[in-house]
Amino acid sequence: MIVCLMLHLVRFSSSPPGFNADEAAYGYNAYSVLKTGKDEFGTPLPLLRLRSYGDNKLPGYMYATIPSVALLGLNEFSVRLPTIISALLLVLVIYLLAREATQNETTACIAALLAAIAPSLNMLSRHAHESVLMTLFISFAAWCMVRIINQKNNLWWYSMGAVIAASFALYTYHSARIFYVVMMPILGYMLWRSHKKTVFVTSLLVACLFIIPFTIAELSTPPSRLANLFIGTNTGIAAMQQELAIMSGKSPFSTTMFVVGNEIMNRYVSYFSPQYLAYHGDTNVRFGYQSMSPLSLIELVFALVGIYWALRNYQKRGVWILLGILLIAPIPGALTWQEYSVIRTYTLFVPLIVFTAIGIALTVDAMRNKKIMWRYGLLLILLGHVAFTARTWEYFLIHYPSRALVIRTWEAGYSELASFVKQNYHTYDHFYITTDVGQSYMFLLFYLKYPPQKYQAAAQTSEPDEYGYSQVPGFDKFSFSNAAELPQELTPGKPVIQVLTESQAKTLSDPEGLQRTELQRIIKGTETIFVIYEVSAPPKSIGYRTTIK
């Protein structure tokens, strides 16, 4: 756990190179609830859904952030601290899960060490993401279930632990739905077979306390973002189906159901491929990059040895719980149109790490009585794994944050923009800011620590766009639009601030007489993120129109 903590703190402010809009939303809403008891839009203690950008986020991570924001104030570290703590606890839970599933202390220690240094687990947990918290709860619930299988005692405590942990996971990240609908019936069956009817009924009642309001929220405020991510809504899938329909007529293989089902199966299988696990990882550069593989090929080989052992011993020690997580984990990723997604399949790496530890322990044990050359060969292989892991971390910490695409994808530059606004807030009457780089309004709320009660009274949003996100047109002195459009008329002698991207600044076409002065460029790495202008009308201006090509 100390090693894991060190890997999270080294170059903490550099990689990743930015602080994204979802992190800012969780942080500011935690700050708002802490100060006023309401979220950014004035909803009292949102327990079921967090309106946020119109995507109806699950509120679990926001509530997990409140203690750190209360203790450390509203800043990037306090928002990311719950994820870091989750990663540290996940090392402990993986140790417990491996020890309980294998009844082998050596295997459990190897699993803990692998979890502490694994890029697959720890690169994502360096920023605030709810899938890490969800995986911690799911893994703890799995450990409780294995304990129930193994010892038959203290069923009440472990059944409560499993139900509450799985239910908390349900309120953290959308992928937990699939685990919940599989794990809870299995837990119920286990308790029913144990003839502990009181424990069974109590667990059922506790589960209902969580699932009933969750179901009501699902029906009343469905997460629009999920509908947009579902693979069946992808235009490429629709085009594929239409092409097959033209070629095959009314063939059952050209129906939407078959095309979507076939694509889901292909994507499901692809999550077990070396291409995903040991080469590319997430195709979204915010969560992965071509040279940052979640696992090494060596690790993958040992995992196969561990899976083979588990298949041979599936009836013993609750190993089938690990196999179940392994098979369930890729489903959320397979149901969406993104090719590879670490955030939706993050839980997959928990059983893979345990199986890798089993494979290493079995191989080391098998080599004890072999010739010394075999033992040296195994040592070289293990050192190779360490080298591959170190290379991945070196790339992530040094090279990854300097990539132009990474810098832009991470929405870097808002901290510096907020500093400029704070310094010049009383100098200018209005700030016109582009939304071409994410949700500008939320970053200003976050970095300015804008009083939540004041914002709640004026909060307004637009209709959701094609991706399910709403925009805030403005508040206070700030107006937000894609090209930071100026009004048709400006008051002479009262300059305003206009914030554009570099590409927008290059295509400006101002009306005659408009006075524009570049004040500052916000640069991250090699990229110019924002260009800040002071704009004013001529002294006797009657009116004009601003256009941007």
Image: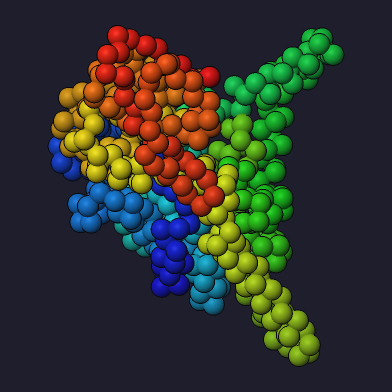
88, 483: nearer the viewer: 483
Relative to 306, residue 77 above or below: above
Identify the residue at horizontal 62%, vertical 24% (top origin).
Answer: 234
- 115 displayed left or right of 377: left
**Where's residue 328, x and y in %?**
57, 44
Q: Give the percent coordinates (x, y) of residue 159.
A: 36, 52
Q: Work out whether 449 lies above or below 476.
A: below
Residue 513 in sight from this viewpoint? yes
Identify which residue, 83 or 442, lies in the foreground. Answer: 442
Q: Is residue 134 at all visible to an observer of this figure?
A: no
Colouring rule applied to residues: rainbow
Tell me: residue 227, above or below residue 27.
Answer: above
Left or right, residue 24 beside residue 40: right
Image coordinates of residue 495 in percent, x first then y, are 27, 27
Residue sitting at the far right? 247
Q: Residue at the location (69% across, 86% down)?
A: 368
- How many discs mark residues in the rendered view? 0
| Residue plotted at (68% across, 18% down) | 238
Image coordinates for residue 35, horizontal then vertical, percent: 15, 41
Q: Nearer the viewer, residue 539 or 475?
A: 539
For residue 510, side relative to residue 294 (left or right): left
- Name the side, left or right, on which 160 lies relative to 274: left
In the rendered view of the protein, which quadrant contains the N terminus? bottom left
Give above or below for 103 relative to 325: below
Q: Residue at x 44, y 20 (%)?
A: 510
On the image, which quarter does residue 48 sit in? Answer: top left
Indicate the quadrant where residue 231 lies.
top right
